[in-house]
Image (cartoon, rainbow, N blue to C red):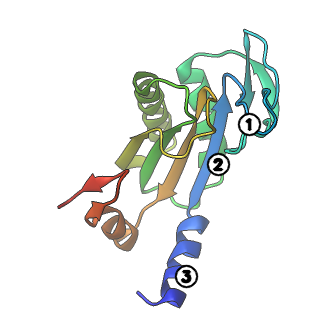
Amino acid sequence: MKLKDLKALGERVNEVTRSMGVALSSCTVPAAGKPTFELGPDEMEMGVGIHGEAGRQRLKLKTADEIAGDLVCAIAGDLASRDEALLVVNGFGATPVMELYVMFNSARTQLARHGIKVSRALVGNYVTSLDMAGCSITVTSLDKELAGHWDAAVHTSALRWGM
């Protein structure tokens, strides 16, 4: 694709994508040498930034289903399309993959309650905040063209499929 077409595609994907994260611990930025923010043992930070920024709201710990419900409610309320979607559950670096799959299952269930069918998914630690415990849920509304781009063969050091 030409650069202008890639730019247009990127802007289009951005328009149909929503994401929100939750942290159960802060990250330690090497230059600072200390956690970006402090959480009590029974607290979590909702709406955190991928670079370790504090979130929009500090809450008492909740179950995976409750956390997914809060995240998906904010995301689904802002999505234009209710058709099929790509669901990405991204770990922030210190969350075991098994727990990310628990969050995936909860998020998929919550999205279905909002009439959104998950037809593509990715679960793992892809964009981390160093040693932060937590994850983000990202939902991209898919049409035939965007699904085709997602389904295309990928051969990178981090992702490989369709070869």
Task: Give the left or right position of residue 143, taking residue 74 as reference.
Answer: left
Q: Which quarter of the rendering shows the C terminus? A: bottom left
Q: What element carries label 1?
A: loop
Name which of mark 3 and mark 1 comes first in the sequence: 3
Vertical arrangement, residue 142 with respect to residue 7, above or below: above
Badge nearest the viewer, 2 or 3: 3
Q: Which amino acid does label 2 sit on?
A: Gly
Residue 77, numbered circle:
2
Residue 29, numbered circle:
1
Question: Dividing the picture into quarters, in which one does residue 42 lie?
Answer: top right
What is the C-alpha distance between the residues marked 2 and 3? Answer: 24 Å
Q: Which quarter of the rendering shows the N terminus? A: bottom left
Name which of mark 2 and mark 1 comes first in the sequence: 1
At 31% from the left and 69% from the top, the residue drawn is 148
What is the C-alpha distance between the residues marked 3 and 1? Answer: 34 Å
Vertical arrangement, residue 153 with respect to residue 33, above or below: below
Q: Is mark 3 on a helix, strand or loop?
A: helix
Asked if disc 2 and disc 3 are in contact, CB closer than 8 Å, the reply is no
At 61% from the left and 29% from the top, the residue drawn is 131
Q: Can residue 116 be seen in this view?
A: no
Measuring from the top left, give residue 90's x and y in whole percent: 51, 40
At 61% from the left and 26% from the top, the residue drawn is 133
Measuring from the top left, give residue 129's x and y in whole percent: 63, 39
Q: What residue type is labelled 3?
A: Ala
At 58% from the left and 61% from the top, the residue drawn is 80
Task: Give the left or right position of residue 32, taking residue 112 as reference.
Answer: right
Q: What residue type is labelled 1?
A: Val
Name which of mark 2 and mark 3 comes first in the sequence: 3
Task: Give the left or right position of residue 108, taking residue 76 as reference.
Answer: left
Q: Around disc 2, counting alpha carbons within 10 Å, would you say few (fewer than 14), some (14 to 19), or many (20 or more)?
A: few
Q: What element carries label 2?
A: loop
Measuring from the top left, give residue 139's x and y in whole percent: 51, 50
